[in-house]
Amino acid sequence: MIRVSRVGLVHGAFLLFAVALVGRAAWVQVGQADRWRARATTQQMVEREIPAARGAILDAAGTVLVESRSLVRLDIAPTEVKQPRELAAALRRVGVTNEFVQRSIDRKRKWVELPGRFLSTDVDDILKMRGVHPRPVLERVPPSTDGLRRLLGTVDRDGKAVGGVEVALDGVLRGVPGRTRLAKTGRLGVLTSPEEGYVPPSPGRTAVLTLHQGLQDIAERALTDAIQTLDARGGDIVVLDPHTGEIRALASRRARADASGATALTEPYEPGSTLKPFIAAALIEKERVELDETVNTYDGTYKLHGRVIHDIHKAKQMSFAEVIRYSSNIGIVQFAERLTPGEQYEALRDAGFGMTTGAPYPSESNGRLRPPSTWSKQSPASLSMGYELAVTPLQLALAYGAIANGGELLEPTLVKELRDADGDVSWKAKRRVVRRIMSEKTAKTMRGLLREVVTDGTATSADLASYQLAGKSGTARRMRDDGKGYEDGSYTASFVGLFPAEDPQLVILVKLDAPSGAYYGGKIAAPVTKAVLEAAIAARDAALDPSKLAGPPVRVAANDTAAAALREETTRAVAAAEEKARDAEQPGAPFVVELGVDTPVVKRVVSARPVPSVRGLTTRNAVRELHRAGFRVSIVRGDHAETLPAAGTVMPAGTTIRLVAQR
């Protein structure tokens, strides 16, 4: 039997411990190498995300509406600060409150996150100090007007899109964040490690909208003034190009705080008499009526299926043209009986009612248009007068666009193009025809009928002294909020205009909700359209081509040969003036035609006016004053508000004035 001494046992135990220790060390260094290497990396390195610059949003002329700028947030490690007095003074200079200044130099604290964001140039001296740790962030600079802010939306503190165009285009605007690794170095804090995985951020693309900032501001101002003057609950203005479907301005305002920034797309309403032209167009297209054909209008009172229908303009009888001109409910109801329910439904459906327009905007409404199987005996009459259906202002404006462009219903365009970070166009909008809803001949006939509405009918308040305007007014009772019946004494007043009447460049829809006092669309909505057009013409906004605007109409009787000769003479003179304008490379320059005994004389008018003073005004009010004076505006940033050229300088109308707004 082998006897083991105590010393041998101790030596054996030490040997086993050494073998286990070596084995464990080998396992850790070989078998678990990746695990411990990763843990070491996490302890020695810190990964930080580099925010990507969100793409800018521009208007159709290239003016910046929304952009992002690089800022920094400051974190302070008080134990690392070597110059507390200098740091405290520098922080106070950039507006840091005394509370956080004291925290930043309190050596009992390990870390202080300062509130606010700073331009790197403003805190350049602070960034050079020990103990200051900057964090790059991006700030979204919002548009200058409340209306545009609601329409375009915003981003929250974390850079997430909130509402409007920001949400609709978030996928192309937000970009891709980058990342970098920082090495921990003990006393020195952290240092950038260029050898580790640095991935640069990819900035978002720039979105160019079809909106025109000048026209948008004009529409917002006109809508605000109308709502305040009439004590209305809200309203909408839509301005679009009927030949391309491009939305030039979109102004919406509601008294409710929870309202969308573009209720013109999200809140449908019963359009009233503004729907009558589409019933009329269907009758003309199907050759069911003649313009001079008359019906009995019963002196303004007519009973149908137990329901009494009234006309504001009372007459014993009216022709089809007069029914549109004076917006006769009795007349349109009788003419609409020549359409079957299926034909009437098809005409309204083809005009785009009851379906989304396809605009790139969140929460667009379909509106409401019920199929004939659900109609009552009174439904055809109600629909012909603009009731028992609901449309959004954008749907109605696009439908009028078909009358303006020769019969084609277009898909609306809000985004004109997308540009990469290097400025190259990566996507461009194309004109898209949804369907043809009437022939060119019918569309031209309808424009003639709508022109008479403005010159001699229900919307003479919209008549312009210098240019022809066509359009249709509407006044409709408002539904209760619970959808059960109509609200007593509450109406929607609206007007849709085509400008100019002969070859429209713009469709302008104005809708006012529950105005106090007068409520007829032709009396209160039509003048708002006139105000928008007058301001747009004066400002010579890029949304209008002044060279294509015809002069005032010369009205003559059919048998008045002397007046006809005068009209022909005037036409020749205007043509000569336009030719001279082209030769002088001044298309659209104003002129006066003087008719002499022998030959008309054309004289050029120098349309110049002094630049108004805007000193002391807010940026928004300054832009308004310059637009009102007939100038276009380009906003730049500076130390104090002024204009370039200076106030009092005489400049031609339509000149772009640089407005220096305070930073």
Image: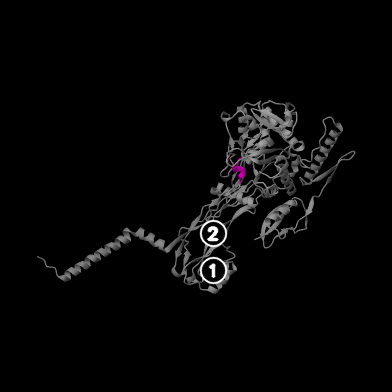
In the drawing, what numbered circle is on residue 99? 1
Q: Residue 37: percent from the left, percent from the top?
A: 37, 60
The answer to whether 196 appears left or right of 379 in the picture is left
The answer to whether 485 appears left or right of 228 in the picture is left
Magenta stretch: give its range: 262-268
Residue farthest along the right direction in this orientation: 597
In the drawing, what numbered circle is on residue 120? none
2 vs 1, front mark: 1
10 Å neighbourhood of mark 1: few (<14), some, or many (≥20)?
A: few
Specify whether residue 263 is painted magenta.
yes
Residue hosting label 2: 137
Specify whether residue 120 is painted magenta.
no
The answer to whether 73 appears left or right of 538 in the picture is left
Q: Is residue 155 visible?
A: yes
Q: Residue 2: percent from the left, percent from the top?
A: 11, 66
Which amino acid, by three-letter code, is at mark 1?
Glu
**Residue 553: quarter of image:** top right
Residue closer to the observer: 364 or 425 = 364
The CA span between labels 2 and 1 is: 23 Å
Q: Residue at x 51, y 71 (%)?
A: 105
Q: Residue 13: percent from the left, percent from the top?
A: 21, 67
Q: Residue at x 67, y 63 (%)?
A: 639
Above or below, 238 against 63 in this view is: above
Q: Quadrant of the N terminus?
A: bottom left
Q: Quadrant of the C terminus?
A: bottom right
Q: Residue 252: percent from the left, percent from the top?
A: 64, 46
Q: Residue at x 60, y 43 (%)?
A: 265
**SS state under label 1:** helix
